[in-house]
Amino acid sequence: MNNDSIYQFTVEKLNGEHIGLADYRDKVLMIVNIASQCGFTPQLNDLAELKKEFSGEDFDILAFPSNDFGGQEPLQGEEIAAFCHNYGSDFTIFEKSRLRGEFAIPLYKYLAKTSKPRWNFHKYLIDRNGKVVDFFYPFTKPTSSKIKKKIQRLLAAVSK
């Protein structure tokens, strides 16, 4: 297994199911931390739109709710799923997690080597080989042309 990719990690979905990120091998991914009470929360609409735009392609969005940034995620479990559903989300939402500092989940400790998330809706773009190729601060909307062009280029690339 490649120890220099996200594929080495197992994460927990909202339903308690553990899933290895190796299941996403050969896909382009956006990993984003979300929160229901944040000024950037309307980006859930943008994430849903982005997922829809690239439906049928090897692209997916993995959302990680966290209360680490301003205590802006008071919801738990299925409450989070229901809240996100109101924004049209059909991407995978994982268990509410610690994403920064010494108690961060291992995936986010790995991602932080590229860029430490400083707030909710920090986005990481992952190539087909499970490597972080870019990141975007919260103020960059998921539907920005900058992000869409990078996703298109990554989808056109063949995994190694």
Image (cartoon, helix red, strand yellow):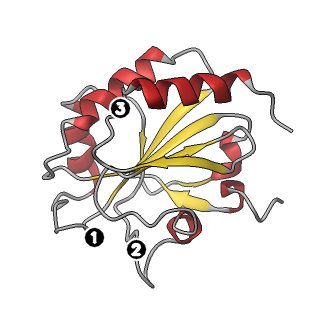
Q: Residue drawn 25% across and 28% down?
A: 45
Of residues 88 and 29, the one nearer the viewer is: 29
Can residue 83 be seen from the camera position used here?
A: yes
Q: Quadrant of the N terminus?
A: bottom right
Give the mark nearest the N terminus, 3 or 1: 3
Residue at which label 3 appears: 47
Q: Residue at x 71, y 57 (%)?
A: 5
Q: Say whether residue 89 is visible.
A: no
Seen as rendered, the residue at the extreme bottom is 102
Q: Amino acid at mark 3?
A: Leu
Question: Label 2 to label 1, Cα distance in Å?
Answer: 7 Å
State the image coordinates of residue 123 (x, y, percent, origin top left).
43, 47
Instruction: Name the residue type under label 2.
Output: Arg
Rounded to the nearest angstrom, the CA distance separating label 3 from label 1 is 21 Å
Residue lying farthest to the right in this orientation: 160
Which residue occupies the foreground of this view, 135 or 102?
Answer: 135
Tell me the element at label 3. helix
Residue 16 falls in image quadrant:
bottom left
Circle 1 SS class: loop
Q: Is residue 33 left or right of residue 36?
A: right
Front position in the image: 134 or 40: 134
Residue at image mark 1: 68
C-beta proximity under 8 Å, tags 3 and 1: no
Q: Mark 2 or mark 3: which comes first in sequence?
A: 3
Q: Residue at x 57, y 39 (%)?
A: 29
Q: Are marks 2 and 1 in contact (CB under 8 Å)?
A: yes
x, y percentage for residue 95? 39, 58
Q: Is residue 92 left or right of residue 42?
A: right
Quarter of the image containing the C terminus? top right
